Image: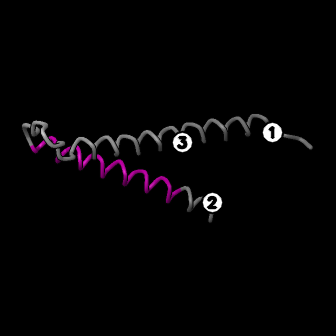
Amino acid sequence: MNIDWAALGSVFGVSLVATVALVGLFTLGIVGLSKSAAPAEGATAPSGTGSAAVARAGAYVCFALCLGAVSYGIYMIVA
């Protein structure tokens, strides 16, 4: 049996980078949604609603990119 260690290392590296990027995007989406959430009882209201709308839109973009990456991965496995 002959193992191509360079190819195995390449697959490991790409998988590691893709996983970290995907988790990072999902985390940014969660943070974006938490920025746009209503304040807790007794807390002061945010000064502007524009930043909340931008944060929510950014979160939706991050989630869409995550969905696209996962869909592309499934497509590559099936095809």
Q: Is residue 38 left or right of residue 16?
A: left
Q: Is 53 inside the magenta-drawn segment?
A: yes
Mark 1 sits on what residue? 4
Please state which amino acid type lies under the numbered disc 1: Asp
Residue 75 drawn in magenta: no
Mark 1 to mark 2 CA distance (whole Å):
21 Å
Give the residues drawn in magenta, as a range: 49-72
Q: Position of residue 30 (x, y in %)?
A: 34, 45
Position of 74 with respect to 47 (left or right) is right
In the foreground, 8 or 55? 55
Q: Residue furthest bottom?
A: 79
> In the rendered structure, which disc, 1 or 3, sits on the residue that comes first in sequence?
1
> Which residue is identified by label 3?
19
Badge 1 density bin: few <14, some 14–19, many ≥20, Cα 10 Å: few
Of helix, strand and loop, which one carries label 1? loop
Q: Nearer the viewer, mark 1 or mark 3?
A: 3
Residue contact at pointers 1 and 2, CB within 8 angstroms? no
Point out which mark residue 77 bears.
Answer: 2
Tell me: residue 75, above or below residue 29.
below
